[in-house]
Image (cartoon, grey):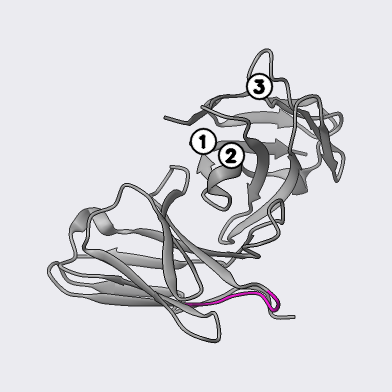
Amino acid sequence: DAGVTQSPTHLIKTRGQQVTLRCSPKSGHDTVSWYQQALGQGPQFIFQYYEEEERQRGNFPDRFSGHQFPNYSSELNVNALLLGDSALYLCASSTYRDSGTEAFFGQGTRLTVV
Amino acid sequence: GNSVTQMEGPVTLSEEAFLTINCTYTATGYPSLFWYVQYPGEGLQLLLKATKADDKGSNKGFEATYRKETTSFHLEKGSVQVSDSAVYFCALTESDSWGKLQFGAGTQVVVTP
């Protein structure tokens, strides 16, 4: 079992550009959540996807959008990048209907905006 | 809204010392509580969890007890090893928003030989 996989591992973008990050959940999981972790801080919840729909959203602007595919994998898109978007982006997968299950995290994508 | 507060780091201690990391929370309902650990260059790993008051989570020698009366979930380990050097995050999730984890700022622990 490969666990949660994210790609790419590192990315450098210029202000104003757009970026797409990808996540494949752990086998058997159907729910994907995305988090932003700024340097030296705890992860902040961006949103959660289940059955290809956004189910919950944190306090992030509309520049942050996502998608979930029928195979449960997910993408995080960020438009009009700002320097402040530089962070580690973490994907977590879990099972929606089995509340209490552990969320498994990927190793993250390190985004640097210059 | 919900929030998690944990003690600031870094916490530096010698091998075999006792470790305590304080965590307190505010929540509107009855949250589940977690400790996650992040080793350098890696993602988060669940260390332990507790889903109701007075539950004790334990794993790899670490323990934490869900104290509703003090809204706390302090992490303890009796004898740390160099390999325990990492950043530790306290987190909660509410039952009506399962999967939306609210994290503390993290506490870096450095264990020296």
For disc 1, the marked residue is: B104
Q: Position of residue A108 (x, y in %)?
A: 50, 66
The answer to which of A86 and B11 lies nearer the viewer is A86
Pointer 3 chain: B
Q: Earlier in the sequence, mark 3 or mark 1?
A: 3
Q: Which amino acid, mark 2?
A: Ala
Q: Position of residue A79 (x, y in %)?
A: 20, 70
Q: Dot 3: few (<14), some (14–19), or many (≥20) neighbours within 10 Å?
A: many
User: Start and end of the magenta stretch?
Assistant: A23-28
Q: Main secondary structure of the magenta part?
A: loop
In this view, B79 is above or below A78: above
Q: Which amino acid, mark 3?
A: Ser
Give the quadrant of the N terminus of chain A: bottom right
Which quadrant of the view contains residue B74? Answer: top right
- Work out how far the residue at label 2 is from the one at label 1, CA to CA, in angstroms: 6 Å
Judge from the rendering whether residue A36 lies leftward or rightward of residue B80; answer left or right.
left
Pointer 1 chain: B
